[in-house]
Image: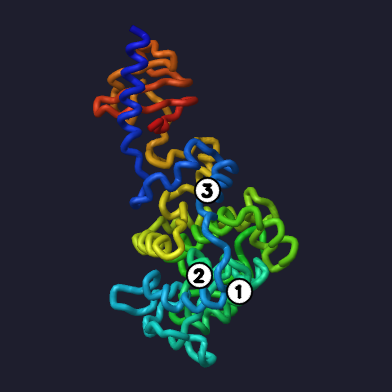
Amino acid sequence: MKQLLLIALMMLVGTVGCYAQGPHDSGEYYKAADGKKGAALKTALCGIIYSRDEGGDLNTAYRALWTHFRTTDARDDGSVWDMYSNLREMTFGDDQDTGSGNKEGQFYNREHSFPNSWFGGKVMPMYTDLHHMYPTDKVVNNKRGNNPFGETSNPTYKSANDFSKLGPCSYPGYTGTVFEPNDMYKGDFARTYFYMVTCYEEKIADWYRDNPESQPTLDGNAYPGLSNWQLDMLMKWAENDPVSEKEINRNNAVFGIQKNRNPFIDYPELERFVWGDLKDTAFSYDHYSTTGIIDIKDSSIDGQQPEAIFAPDGKRLEELRKGLNIIRLKNGKVLKVVKGVQTFEN
């Protein structure tokens, strides 16, 4: 009987697994990260997303950004989607680097939101990586310079309509000059930085050592990768400004061009599994959940009574208990419960 029960359970698990599918038609793209936690999850993600060819002609790839932006950063009306300025006067051009740009809303740059001086300048593939490159107002971008992202309560500069700010950092842990984007895009930039320190984690030590401007933002290590104050702030930004449709569409468009994805957009709140309160919880690429992770109370799961509960050896249990349980709900879903929290098994 025990063997028949295990076989039946394994068949059910296998049936569910046959339909494994990551978000946004990503299929098994993230499968190699399945079951990983914290630092190991970050490294596994690095192995997945840092898989494209680092070769190619830099100048050709850099020029191509003017064309790529028409796909990745166009508003519905066809205008440039700029996250540094809220003036909607710019239209796409083949080369916006001509002219100095003496007023906001006139020209746009190919902005390295993670400044290129932090990784040594014109170095591939970072120099043309679309996941951190955006078309941004030339005047506002020049004001930002190579300063870190941060928060300032006493800005020395504000863009039109007080949209972006520059000034001394008021966020605890740093007092230097920072650039503060508008609240509506803080989550976008947080997830951009999560991508950068994940995709290029093996390069962080060199960046930190060779490029002092990076040191307020980075910590010089593969994990966590970001300095304490920067990580705290970006985690807050990501929480307050969740993943938007704009980010999802852009992530898909970038994937179409350079064939890699930003997992922090595909999996909202993934940063919690890498650095935050869920870093001791295993990541599931095809049954991802943050809100579904709950404490076991009154032998119920999200208000549902389990249809059947089994120990790992196939023994049927009378009630849910803390530790390892295999649970079948009435809808046929199979779950695993570990250490008193619910996580998807398949």
User: Residue lying farthest top?
Assistant: 1
Which quadrant of the figure has residue 28? top left
Marks 1 and 2 sit apart, C-alpha to C-alpha, by: 23 Å
Percent position (x, y) of residue 171?
Answer: 60, 61
Q: Specify few, some or many for label 3: CA neighbours under 10 Å numbering under 14, 14-19, or 20 or more.
A: many
Tell me if residue 271 comes above or below residue 132 in the rendering. above
What quarter of the picture does the N terminus occupy? top left
**Who's the residue at 25% across and 25% down the image?**
330
Tell me if residue 140 comes above or below residue 128 in the rendering. below
Marks 3 and 1 sit apart, C-alpha to C-alpha, by: 34 Å
Q: Which residue is mark 1?
A: 167
Q: Which residue is mark 3?
A: 45
Q: Specify few, some or many for label 1: CA neighbours under 10 Å numbering under 14, 14-19, or 20 or more.
A: many
**Who's the residue at 42% across and 65% down the image?**
257
**Who's the residue at 44% across and 88% down the image?**
106
Percent position (x, y) of residue 156?
Answer: 59, 79
Marks 3 and 2 sit apart, C-alpha to C-alpha, by: 20 Å
Tell me if residue 335 comes above or below residue 203 in the rendering. above
Q: Amino acid at mark 2?
A: Met
Q: Disc 3, disc 1: CB below 8 Å?
A: no
Label number found at residue 133: 2
Nearer the N terminus, badge 3 or badge 2?
A: 3
